[in-house]
Amino acid sequence: MKLGVVGLPNVGKSTLFNAITSAGAECANYPFCTIEPNVGVVAVPDERLDVLGKMYNTRKITPAVLEFVDIAGLVKGASQGEGLGNKFLSHIREVDAIVHVVRCFDNPNIIHVEGSIDPIRDITTINLELILSDMEAVKKRLDKAEKLAKQGDKQQAEEAALLNRIYAHLSDEKCIRTMTFTAEEKELVDSFFLLTSKPVIYCCNIGDDDIGAPDNEYVKAVKAYAAAEGSQALSICAKIEEEIAAITDKDEKQMFLTEMGLGESGLDRIIKSGYELLGLISFLTAGEKEVRAWTITKGTKAPQAAGKIHSDFEKGFIRAEVVTYDELVEFGGFNQAKEKGRVRSEGKDYVMQDGDVVLFRFNV
C-alpha cells in the first residue's frame, strides 16, 4: 500500500513524514521545501508476529510494509502548472490513498502560505485543484467516447454516459469519491486513475497543548467535513510524533505514549485507517525459518493469496491448511491445533480472513 502525504506548504507534512518513517526528509519553514517526493517504507506494527516468532523460535520476522510518499506542497493554480503543480499531480496519481495533512493549530512563528489558519479553506484549495485536473482528464476521455459512440459503439456509449455523470459532479466542485457507482461502474472508474476518486485520511496536525484535550474548533470542522464525504479524519501532533519516533525502546515508548495520554502512536492510527479505507487485511505464515505477514484485500480467495507468496503457489494450488491466529496460540502450535481438529482444509473458493495462519499445498 502506498500512501501519499499531501497538504499546503508549511502545514507539517514533512515533519509528520519524518516522524513516521524516520526517512530524514528535509524540513524547513518555507514553501516548496519538498520538491522531489521523499519515499519511506515502514513496517506495519503487528504484535501477532512477535508472539509467533517466540512460538516457533523463528530466525526471521518479516512484517507487512507501507510506503509513504511525501509529495511537494500545493498552491492555487497547480492544475494549471502553478508552483510545482504538474509534479504534484503526477506523483499523487501513483498512490493508493491520500493522507491529507491539515494545519489545526495556531503559531505565529510558523508561516502559513495563506496568511491565516482555516483548515476547510486549505482542504478546499487542494481538492479544487484535483477536481480541475480530473475535469480535464475526463473531458478528453469523454470526447473520444462520444465520437466512438456516434459510430455505433455501444460500450463507448455507456462509458460516455458515465463520464458525463462524473463531469457534472466535478463541475459542482465535488470529488468523485462522494459519488455512488455500481460494481461494474466502479471497476471502470478505477481504470481512469482519477485523483479525486482516491480515498482520503484527513490528518489534523494539532499543537502539543491540544494533546489529550477535546477537539479544538479546527479539528471539529475537519472531522465534520470528512464525515460528509465518507472519508476519515484523525488528530496527530507531528511535533510529538517526532519525539515518539526517536524512542527506540518499546517499553519506554509505551510509557511516553501513556504519559501523553495517547493509546497508540499516530503511525499506528494512520495504518489502521489506511487498511480500513482500502479494505486490506493480513494473513500470516509461520515456521522456524520465517514468520511473515502478507497484505491482501478483503474478499481475496486462497489461490490468489497463495500467489502473493509465489506465482507457482497460485498456479499449482491444491488446498490451504488454515487455522486462526487465536486458536494457534491457544493450542501452542500448528501441529497441536491440527491434533485438536482446529486446522481446516480449504479449497479454491475459500475467502481469506484477517489473522489466518496458512500453510499452502501446491504442485507445479
Image (cartoon, rainbow, N blue to C red):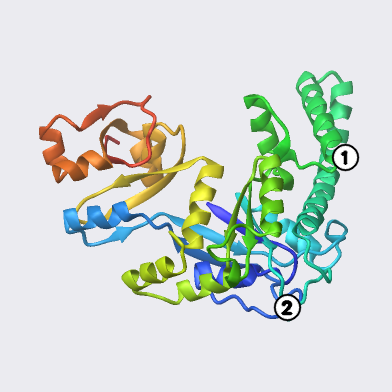
Seen as rendered, the residue at the extreme front is 214
From the viewer's perspective, is 39 left or right of 29? left
* Residue 194 in view (yes/no): no
Q: Is residue 13 above or below residue 315?
A: below
> For the residue carrying disc 2, how many other residues have a C-alpha within 10 Å: few (<14), some (14-19), or many (20+)?
few
Name which residue lies at 51% across and 61% down.
266
Residue at mark 2: 110
Q: Is residue 209 above or below residue 165?
A: below
From the viewer's perspective, is 53 left or right of 213? left
Name which residue lies at 53% across and 55% down.
270
Residue type indicated by callout 1: Ser
Name which residue lies at 70% across and 40% down.
228
Q: CA distance from mark 1 to mark 2?
A: 35 Å
Residue at mark 1: 171
| Nearer to the camera, 117 or 351 | 117
Q: Quadrant of the C terminus?
A: top left
Residue 11's x, y, as percent?
70, 68
Residue 108's x, y, as percent?
75, 78
- What secondary structure is found at the residue carrying circle 2? loop
- What secondary structure is found at the residue carrying circle 1? helix
